[in-house]
Image (tube, rainbow, N blue to C red):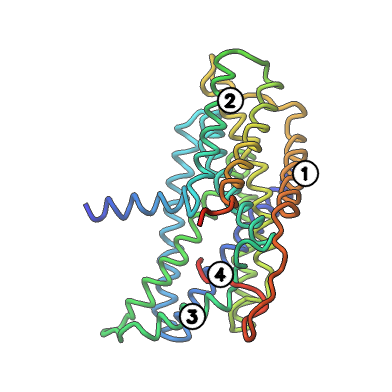
Amino acid sequence: MDAATWGLIVATFVACFVEMVEATTIVMAMGYTRSWKSALVGTFAALGALAVVTLAAGYALANWLPESALQLAIGGLLLIFGLQWLRKAILRSSGRKAVHDEDAIYREEVEAAKSAGESKGGLDLFAFMVSFKGVFLEGMEVVFIVLTFGLNANNIPAASLGAAAAVVIVLVIAIALRRPLSMINENLLKYGVGLLLASFGTYWAVEGIGIFRDGRESLNWPGHDLMILVLIAAWLVLSRIFVAALRKPAAPAPVGAPDIAVEVKK
Amino acid sequence: MKFLKAFGQFWYDFIIGDDWKIAVAVVLALVVLFAAMTAKLFGDTGLTLLGGALIVVAFSISLAIDVRPKKR
């Protein structure tokens, strides 16, 4: 297996790992407080829907669009996702945005589950819908990442392998621990994924602009694929400069306040 | 109608997310790159480097807008 394939597997693995941790938190909250059966039915229904979306979108993208249009469309999407993750990572690292905390999200979901009314019948609709929505929404980003990386590298199986490995590992950890996966430094992982998505997104979106010129040929970066490494380094340096420049001096915390602000928004 | 609204909301949340400025920054950078390509200002090397630089600058501006001091 060559370096590019390993890079592809690692990128999709880390991206999928982050999203899976978030989805697992929601499903566990529903399972422990409402109904495991309904939460798991919602999860598998969402996974089925995601599989259909992946097949349909993958087929359409691979067969209907010229290569440069594909690069522009999915490179642009990847770039937007990546820069949004990078923006959040910069704001969190510089103390301007609350850090993401799976424990806090879990508590919030549990409160919502407890305050929702009892469901009648065999299936708890509240647990089903919350689990379905959580898994489907988090999974959609993974689907796009797997498709974009896989199609551009001409290796959907490798990209899918990275994502599937992340699903299995997160599930094994969750089943073993039986509690939210808050020990995982999700903020750091998101920073890493943000750097990868921003770099690959920049590379492909710029190449894809070639769709608008005569012959519809993609633009060619100097150094070709090696330029992706330069872009990763550039986004890393830029983000560190932003973190240093935007860092807020720590204000004295009020008595009884937690050490660090946390974010419960998914 | 309700379905269409929910469908539109889903894609808005999915693509634009909680910060519309990033999406606008990316689109603007690519539009300027398109204009430079149409005007035949540079060859492929110049255009790709310009594109990378434009995206970096657009992202920096959107972040600067985010953290600017708020008027009281």
Badge 4: how crowded within 10 Å, few (<14), some, or many (20+)?
A: some
Residue A95: give x, y in percent of width and height: 67, 63
Q: CA distance from mark 4 to mark 2?
A: 37 Å
Residue A235 visible in the shown view: yes
Q: Secondary structure at mark 1?
A: helix
Q: Do pointers 4 and 2 mark residues of a single chain?
A: no
The residue at which mark 4 appears reads as A263
Q: B21 above or below B3? A: above
Of the two numbered discs 4 and 1 on the same chain, state the one appearing first in sequence: 1
Residue B58 location (% of width, % of height)? 60, 37
The mark tally for this picture is: 4
Q: Residue at x 58, y 34 (%)?
A: A205
Tell me if A83 is positioned left or right of A28 in this view: right
Q: Are marks 1 and 3 in contact (CB under 8 Å)?
A: no
Task: Please name which of the two marks, 3 or 4, marks the residue nearer to the observer.
Answer: 4
Mark 1 vs mark 3, CA separation in Å: 39 Å
Residue on which the image places disc 3: A29
Is residue A146 in view?
no
Location of mark 2 (residue): B33
Instruction: Estimate the x, y position of residue A189 in percent, counting from the top left.
Output: 68, 61
In the displayed structure, A183 sits above or below A233; it is below
Mark 1 vs mark 3: tell me if same chain: yes
Residue lying furthest left in this view?
Answer: B1
User: Which mark is drawn over residue A233?
Assistant: 1
Percent x, y of residue A226: 77, 35
